[in-house]
Each structure stands twice: as structure tokens, then as C-alpha cells.
Amino acid sequence: MSDLQNKLKKIQQDKSKDDKQLEAEDIDEIIEFTLSQKHNDRETYYKPNYLEQIIPDCYKSVKFDDKKFDLYNEEILFYIFYTFPSDEIQKLAFLALIKKGFLYSKFYRCFVLFKGEKQVDNSKNILNMFDPFNWSMIKREVVYDEKFILSLESKL
């Protein structure tokens, strides 16, 4: 650990000091250290997550065939959509999911398997949604109100 980190640890452990009793030089040193960090540089600021460490580099540069997107199952398309943000392949996965009957709900921030017409009738219906946090399809009771219906996206 650096000297500053040791000082910060010591300050945190010292319960007798109030915030007002911190010495000015300690505060200046903390501010200088904080400002010197490269917060925008992902490589130095963020710890690499475990998944990035165990996946080989050759898997990260996989080439997908644009013509075969309709053949991929939903789980692969969800993986592509959530793994490659701001990439052309994400758009292709989005369009393939739309062809399979999914719509993206901005309200719930997930894909919804939507059958029928988009009609505001304030009725409660049970929809299948893809939960990206649990990585599974879930059933959820949804009110078909104006806010929900207008949040459904089927175009880029």
C-alpha cells in the first residue's frame, strides 16, 4: 500500500478524531491524490472483473456472420446485445430479437415478448420479459397503460 493509503486507513481507524480535527496537510494530500487519479481510464481505474480475466482473448474477438443472425436462439442474441454495446453487432442482435417477437421496453429496460396489438386499455396482463440481471425469462404482471405502451421500441 502507498503511504497515502496507509494514512487514510489510520484516519479511518482513529475514531477519536472528528472531521474538523483532520490536519490541513492530510486533507491537501488526499485531494492531490484524488485529483491525480485517472478516473476516465478504464484500464487503471476499474479493477478488471472476473469474467474478463477468465475469458481468453480469442473469444472476445469472435466474428459473427450477419446472415446467420436469424438462426441464433434468443439467449445468444441477448448475450450479443448486452455484451457488445455501441457496436454494429448489437444493432443486428436487436433487429433479430424484434423479428422473433420481442420488443424493447424503455420503461422496464428489458426485452418483452409481446403478442397482439399495442393498445392502451389499462388492463393487467402477464408478459414474459428477459431479465438481464438474472439472465432468464420472467413472468410479470403489466398494466397496458399509455406510459408502458409508448415505451415499447421496435425500431432503432
Image (tube, rainbow, N blue to C red):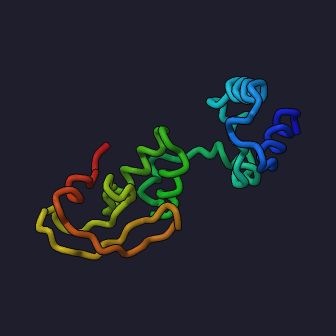
Q: Is residue 99 visible in this depiction of the protein?
A: no
Residue 101, image quadrant: bottom left
Q: Is residue 95 left or right of residue 10?
A: left
Q: Position of residue 53 (x, y in %)?
A: 75, 50
Residue depicted at 38% across the width and 67% down the height: 129
Q: Position of residue 4 (x, y in %)?
A: 83, 33
The residue lying toward the viewer, choosing from 22 and 122, is 22
Label tally: 0
Quadrant housing the C terminus = top left
Residue depicted at 48% across the width and 60% down the height: 72
Q: Position of residue 151 (x, y in %)?
A: 26, 53
Residue depicted at 72% across the width and 44% down the height: 47
Quadrant housing the N terminus = top right
Q: Is residue 153 above or below residue 27?
A: below
Residue depicted at 19% across the width and 66% down the height: 144
The residue lying toward the viewer, choosing from 140 and 8, is 8
The residue lying toward the viewer, choosing from 153 and 122, is 122
The residue lying toward the viewer, choosing from 91 and 34, is 34
Q: Is residue 85 left or right of residue 9?
A: left
Residue 7, image quadrant: top right
Q: Is residue 7 above or below residue 113?
A: above
Q: Is residue 99 left or right of residue 91?
A: left
Q: Position of residue 118 (x, y in %)?
A: 17, 61
Q: Is residue 38 visible in this depiction of the protein?
A: yes
Q: Is residue 11 above or below residue 49?
A: above
